[in-house]
Image: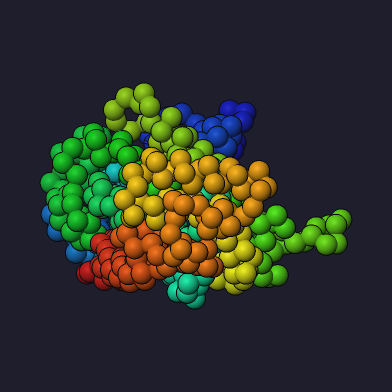
């Protein structure tokens, strides 16, 4: 087909070796430029190339097993797929103007190489099950990769927590000084949140790990395909049970976007603290020059841009999740083109999370905690009020009464009559031993409740954290993620 005789605004269609769309049979002329410009997904779904080839290989082997391809045909198509994969991997693949998406482009190229046998590649398959298969493969890979990156950040936090030893800082509620807490406890808190993220990512994996191949456009096929066998060939743990559902289900995308949004929000909260802590007002941390930026105008500035951008990108993660949920809302069964909107959102969130995890990990790994500044702030005597009340409780005073006694002493000390320590020493409610609690770090050392911000509970907590991280690393290594390159090479190729 050439441009001659075509209606204005139409281009030679492409998509097949002779330049036709995949659906040319029913259509007169080619698609309008505006249609292609608006509907083509190649610019972004090119990232699914490897996963599409993986799905196509399994599909070809499946067709051969049930006699829909001869041995010779399947060998020919598989060889063409190998060559196509090689061209895609090495940059030698030439796209044509009308390759609508990566799936179309690959099928076109395979048909160019394999000749008439290539025309059988799409037997019993629709792009609807094909796209869902490739994307699920991609998502399984992204989930385990992201989990591994989260674990790398946890390791940085854990190492810093171990280095922190008995150092302590003020713990805050309402951003008001509350009680002194070990720095290790503070770093551990973020680590535990991240461990839930790892758990969520690996849990989402179980629902992404389902093969849609063989569901056809929406209804399966009259051809004798065996979806369970192709699912097994691909390394998926499960196969679909309802073709309408699996061709239109994007729960696995929304769920992954939620995992990334929640993770992004955890990173944002972490980032926010480094913004505060690196300010002159707090002075708790000094960031390494390599992980800070300067000002174009103010020569003295050193800015925590990584921490700020991590905070800023949380908006984008939530936006991508929201976009996917709204796209899905109200879609009738089964496939609708709206579903093509699933990819950019997820690619974006996955990429940005990976960048944030690496940058934040480097920033924290190289930062210097100003332990003296932290300790000075935490040694603020009023931060010991709760511990003082608990000393009275241990001597038999009801807590409410103890609270009131200490509260009155704090009020007097704030009025400027004397320090809290002096007022406590003079108070008949306390005996002499109370002076000990005013020693630097004494309050933290006294705290024993399991999981609490005390020296001993934190030691055992860090052991638990190390064991959890190690177990999660094993889970990541042994996770069934059929889209991972390691899983790919393990896929039988005959
Ligand atoms: N690029 C499209 C997607 O990602 C391919 C599906 C088009 N399918 C169709 N039936 N028109 O969803």
Residue at 27% x, 65% y is 475
Residue 145 locus on image (x, y percent) = 40, 62
Q: Nearer the viewer, residue 126 or 425?
A: 425
For residue 197, above or below residue 248: below
Q: Quadrant of ligand 1?
A: top left
Closer to the camera in the image, 57 or 68: 57
| Residue drawn at the location 39% of the way across and 52% of the way down | 392
Report if residue 181 is visible in the image: yes
The quarter in which the C terminus is drawn is: bottom left
Q: How many numbered marks are there?
A: 0
409 to 378, vertically: above or below: above
- Classify residue 387 by image quadrant: bottom left
- Does 233 sit left or right of 291 as displayed? left
- Specify whether 220 is left or right of 315: left
Question: As displayed, is residue 43 above or below residue 333?
Answer: below
**In the foreground, 13 or 151:** 151
Left or right, 69 with respect to 258, comes to left
Image location of residue 167, percent across then percent down:
52, 70
Residue at point 32% right, 69% down?
460
Q: Residue at x 31, y 35 (%)?
A: 248
């Amino acid at each position: 087909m050439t441009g001659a005789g075509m209606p204005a605004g139409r281009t030679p269609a492409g998509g097949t070796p002779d330049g036709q769309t995949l659906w040319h049979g029913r259509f007169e002329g080619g698609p309008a430029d505006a249609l292609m410009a608006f509907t083509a997904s190649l610019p972004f779904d090119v990232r699914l190339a490897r996963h599409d080839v993986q799905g196509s290989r399994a599909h070809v082997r499946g067709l051969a097993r049930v006699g829909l391809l001869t041995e010779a045909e399947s060998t020919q198509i598989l060889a063409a797929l190998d060559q196509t994969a090689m061209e895609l991997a090495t940059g030698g693949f030439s796209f044509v103007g009308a390759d609508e998406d990566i799936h179309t482009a690959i099928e076109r190229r395979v048909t160019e190489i394999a000749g008439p046998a290539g025309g059988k590649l799409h037997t019993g398959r629709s792009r609807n099950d094909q796209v869902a298969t490739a994307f699920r493969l991609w998502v399984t890979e992204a989930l385990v990769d992201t989990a591994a990156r989260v674990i790398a950040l946890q390791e940085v936090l854990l190492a810093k927590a171990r280095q922190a030893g008995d150092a302590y800082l003020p713990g805050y509620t309402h951003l008001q000084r509350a009680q002194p807490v070990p720095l290790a406890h503070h770093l551990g808190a973020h680590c535990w949140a991240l461990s839930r993220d790892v758990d969520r990512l690996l849990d989402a994996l179980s629902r992404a790990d389902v093969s849609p191949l063989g569901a056809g456009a929406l209804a399966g096929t009259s051809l004798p395909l065996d979806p369970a066998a192709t699912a097994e060939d691909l390394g998926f743990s499960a196969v679909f049970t309802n073709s309408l559902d699996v061709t239109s289900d994007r729960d696995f995308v929304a769920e992954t976007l939620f995992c990334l949004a929640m993770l992004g929000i955890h990173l944002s909260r972490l980032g926010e603290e480094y913004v505060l802590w690196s300010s002159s007002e707090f002075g708790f941390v000094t960031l390494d020059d390599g992980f800070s930026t300067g000002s174009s105008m103010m020569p003295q500035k050193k800015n925590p841009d990584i921490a700020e951008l991590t905070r800023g990108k949380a908006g984008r993660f939530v936006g991508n999740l929201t976009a996917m949920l709204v796209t899905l809302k109200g879609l009738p069964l089964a496939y609708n083109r709206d579903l093509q909107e699933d990819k950019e959102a997820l690619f974006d969130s996955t990429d940005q999370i990976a960048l944030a995890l690496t940058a934040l990990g480097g920033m924290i790994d190289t930062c210097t905690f100003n332990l003296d500044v932290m300790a000075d702030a935490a040694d603020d005597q009023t931060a010991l009020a709760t511990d003082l009340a608990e000393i009275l409780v241990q001597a038999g005073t009801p807590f409410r009464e103890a609270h009131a006694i200490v509260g009155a002493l704090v009020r007097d000390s704030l009025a400027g009559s004397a320090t809290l320590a002096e007022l406590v020493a003079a108070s008949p409610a306390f005996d002499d031993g109370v002076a000990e609690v005013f020693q630097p770090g004494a309050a933290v050392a006294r705290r024993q409740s399991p999981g609490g911000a005390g020296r001993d509970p934190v030691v055992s907590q860090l052991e638990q954290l190390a064991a959890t991280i190690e177990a999660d690393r094993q889970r990541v290594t042994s996770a069934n993620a059929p889209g991972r390159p390691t899983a790919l090479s393990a896929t039988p190729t005959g």
